[in-house]
Image (cartoon, helix red, strand yellow):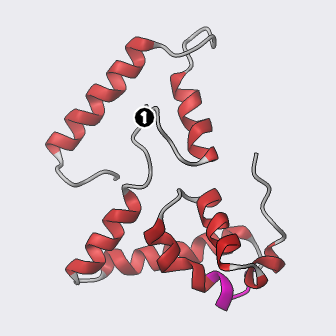
Amino acid sequence: MTTLPAISDVPSLSTEGRAQILDTLFEPCAQLHTLSVSVLHERSFDSYDALIAAVGEQLTGLYESRLESDTRWLDSILVAHPRLGDKKVDSEQSRREQAQLNQGADGAGADVAAAERLASLNRAYEEKFPGLRYV
């Protein structure tokens, strides 16, 4: 499990260190780095919850923007999160989430029927709501 540095140390970390924090809290994503790495340097936070809320405000700003470029930027950040049941995931947090989904009822391993069902549901959702990945 990745350990986060003390919240008071975040502004003084290197760009790479601040990007790693974003990767740990969210998903590895170059577009999120571009959006948020600087705010982690420019602001001090009392807690990681406050840091997450600040990034959330940035994402909300993209969502509320009427600019097509902001919508595309937000979409590129959202698609960094893997679909339910995906085998290839980049972040430790998502690997843990996916592992919970992929355990069979006996806890001994992947339940093939459940994995196939998740894949089927992901496809149906994406066909019904093209471009919409998350509600």
Coordinates of residue 40 in the picture (x, y in percent): 65, 81
Coordinates of residue 109 in the picture (x, y in percent): 58, 14
**Side (left or right) of 130 relative to 27:** left
- Vertical order, 42 against 92 (above or below): below
If the image is split into quadrants, where does the N terminus sit? top right
Coordinates of residue 93 in the picture (x, y in percent): 62, 46
Residue at the image position 78 percent from the left and 61 percent from the top: 4
- Vertical order, 4 against 93 (above or below): below
Residue at the image position 58 percent from the left and 73 percent from the top: 53
- Vertical order, 55 against 134 (above or below): below
Residue at the image position 75 percent from the left and 79 percent from the top: 13
Specify few, some or many for label 1: CA neighbours under 10 Å numbering under 14, 14-19, or 20 or more. Answer: some
| Magenta stretch bounds | 40-45
SS at circle 1: loop
Q: Residue furthest bottom?
A: 42
Q: Quadrant of residue 5?
A: bottom right
**Side (left or right) of 51 relative to 113:** right
Coordinates of residue 11 in the picture (x, y in percent): 74, 84
**Side (left or right) of 134 relative to 103:** left
Q: 94 and 57: which one is in front?
A: 94
**Circle 1 sits on which residue?**
86
Residue at the image position 22 percent from the left and 83 percent from the top: 66
